[in-house]
Amino acid sequence: MTGKPSPVRLHKDLETIWKTPPGIARLSSVNHTILGKRFMLLALIFFAIGGFLSMLIRAQLATPHSAFVGPEIYNQIFTMHGTVMMFLFAIPMLEGFAIYMLPKLLGARDLAFPRVTAYGFWCYFFGGSILVIAMLAGVAPDSGWFMYTPLSSRPYTAGINADVWLLGITFVEISAVTAAIEIFVSILKLRAPGMSLARMPLMAWYMLVTAGMMIVGFPPLILGSILLELERAFDLPFFDPTRGGDSLLWQHLFWLFGHPEVYIIFLPAAGVLSTIIPVFAQRQILGYRAIIAAIVAMGFLSFGLWVHHMFTVGIPHLALAFFSAASALVAIPTAIQIFAWIGTLASGRPRWDIPMLYVFGFFFVFVIGGLTGVMLAMVPFNTQAHDSYFVVAHLHYVLVGGFVFPMLAGLYHWLPHITGRQSVYRLSIPAFWLIFIGFNVTFFLMHLTGLMGMPRRISTYPSNWGWDWLNLLSSVGGFILTMGFSLVLVDMILQFRFGRRFRRDPWRAQTLEWAMPTPPTDYNFASLPRVDMRADAIEPAPLGPVLASGEGYLGFARNNQQETLAVDMMTGVIEHIVILPRRTYLPLWTALATGGFFVSLLLGHYWLAPFFALLVTGLILLWPASLGFREDQGPVPIGRGETAPFDAESTSNAAILANRTALVTNATLFSSLLFGGLFLIVVAPNWDSAPAPLVPVWLSILAVLAAVAGGASAFFARATNRAGGAVTGGLAGAVLAQGIATAAFLAIMAGMGNPTAHASIAIAFVTLGYCALHSAIGAVIAGHALWRKHQGYVSARRATDPELAFLWNGYAGITAVFGAAMALLLGGIL
């Protein structure tokens, strides 16, 4: 680094460092551009599978008394249709889009944890494959995509059908949660210098709130899946009312996830609209700050609406009134965004192009879905329309209108960015009209069949109830819709093959992703920009050549390292240099080992599961083996006459923020478990003479004191390290204390009684198992920090490992207190 390299030399140096080789080596890729495209491509494949299943549904319902498929196969088809569309298409598609686009929008070279992204993709691929293979083998889930108990419990679904859903979806949710943490941390830390939160593009705001919702919203579903699988596999009666369980607990846990998921799906699509509408209106968006406030309000309100899916289960009237009002209230932040978009178009000079056709489709379809949503939020109407085809129509108007139409608009807007070619548009217009007409013919008529009394999830119906002609027209509309999507696919292929090449920014947009070559290079920007204005008011055409010539930050290659910059979360002031890991097969091997764990549970080979769990743990511990420095480096040049330290020497680096975020996810799952225990105590039947778990007070106190001592010891190690002292004693003490806590919790579990006898013992058993697991995790992380210290990776300035040990050991101490209290409460001691 003796002088400024030429632009050609700079490109070659960076390409050498960042490039993923072709062939089998592509499996080792951790680059966000490659992984984002993989996520989106696989999501489209699952979308095609889900679409094919929908056509089978419409073929079955086209005529009365249809014998196209039997009721057992039909149950599998409609269950897999909903599962594929919700879990394997919608959420992974938005994740893939965010993984591909966010670093480019934010002026970074990659996401914060490329190997976590790769691991998430492989979990998604293998988990989705389990579900599809089960469907082909005739053992697909058949209890509905919501898996209500007791239908999905062992007495009523005796095969492995339900286990396929519970374990396959939990496997896929690992991908969703890891992606959410990755996106959340990357938006907060890996932005262009100067890009404060108040200057971020709206797309980043939408994804930040979405990721936060996923971090808090997915754990209840994961917990519910774990509890139901424990009931099915080991007969722990969490949902069995004859032994103190309650099937409504599943509904609460599922919809605590399920309703926020609707907004998790909608918000990224709304971000697409807020990004492309100003481009085609040829003016900046109206109400930038009002939209941000609306996004945050939707995120919070979405968690207060889950009970409106349960209005008919016997909820007290006061609760019905509260959740009905909250369900109507969420229309306000939605309306703020819609009026901002309409106002932007009305006050600008709209330029009509293919993406704008889909924007029009969104307005028409989504507003209808919103209006029917307000109707369903009213308890009297909901009681009449519940579980009818009116709800099916509303769901599709909201999800297809609120997600698919905006994503198709985004596809036509950003596909030139991926391909480097502009669309030929010969099939684009007829494809849109086939989709628009086909969708409305299919689903608008379902409002009428629902109002005429047709229930959901039936495979046949009589011919004398007036539903036959409406169902036939819906089926015709479904096939028209399929033809429209087929034309979109052909149109995409034609663009890849015959589209015209272009230079930067064919749309005259004003965001950073167009200030780079297209298709993008593996490193995105040859040098990183400084953003001193709102990031949706940039002129990419003149900025692109400046960055390509290396005149921004990090416009050089240093020590064969993949570097980008991290900034202060609020102000955008440069904090440190992030050294990103190179390509590796470790995420693939780790995902395969994780898959082995889930498959062993699915096939009933429970003795194999601990082996795979230990293998996953060992592989994850290998991930940071090559990260960090054995000596303090101090601040180094970053360009433009400025210096910054490396991430290993920062106390606010992305690794620490990611672990704090993961603990929030973990705490949400634990809180859901405590909520479940309290719910059963208060609501569930057969608790008057319930057998209490035997929880020795002295052993509980020992476990709590040991876990808290482990947290205190890790805190002492962190403080000592910051002062330049030795950390060995504190970390070793944490390992020992958490080992004692783990043993004490396991001893309590072994002697508390038969957990299959009653839900009170089962809840205490699982709660203390959670505490034992996290004490063990605390010991492992403290031991790993001790090993890193021995290898020379820890000093007073390089303090990440002691910080992580403190976080996880402190969390283990906190959960031990609450977990032991819950067990003592269930045991009748508190």
Image: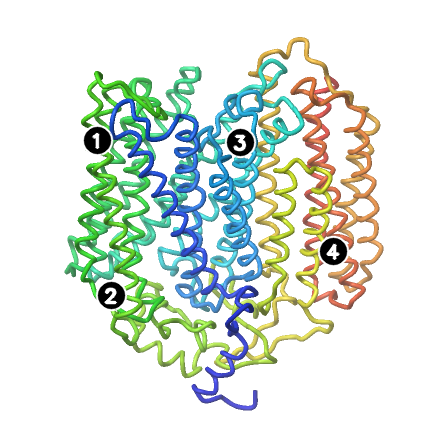
Distance between the Cα atoms at labels 4 and 1? 69 Å
Going by the numbered disc 2, the residue's amino acid type is Ser
Disc 3, disc 4: CB below 8 Å?
A: no
- Numbered disc in front, either 1 or 2: 1
Residue 657, position as x, y percentages in the image: 58, 54
Residue 529, position as x, y percentages in the image: 42, 73
- Numbered disc in front, either 2 or 3: 3
Task: Looking at the image, tell me whether mark 3 or mark 4 is earlier in sequence order.
Answer: 3
Q: What residue do we see at 49% from left, 88% from top?
A: 4
- The residue at which mark 3 appears reads as 162
Residue 190, position as x, y percentages in the image: 50, 63
Q: Is residue 349 above or below residue 384?
A: below
- The residue at which mark 2 appears reads as 423
Distance between the Cα atoms at labels 3 and 4? 46 Å
Going by the numbered disc 3, the residue's amino acid type is Ala
Mark number for residue 718? 4
**Crowding near the residue tagged with mark 1, few <14, some 14–19, many ≥20 C-alpha atoms within 10 Å:** some
- The residue at which mark 1 appears reads as 472
For label 4, the SS is helix
For label 1, the SS is helix
Distance between the Cα atoms at labels 1 and 2? 36 Å
Residue extending furthest front?
Answer: 67
Going by the numbered disc 4, the residue's amino acid type is Arg
Task: Looking at the image, tell me whether mark 1 or mark 2 is earlier in sequence order.
Answer: 2
For label 2, the SS is loop
Distance between the Cα atoms at labels 3 and 1? 32 Å
**Crowding near the residue tagged with mark 3, few <14, some 14–19, many ≥20 C-alpha atoms within 10 Å:** many
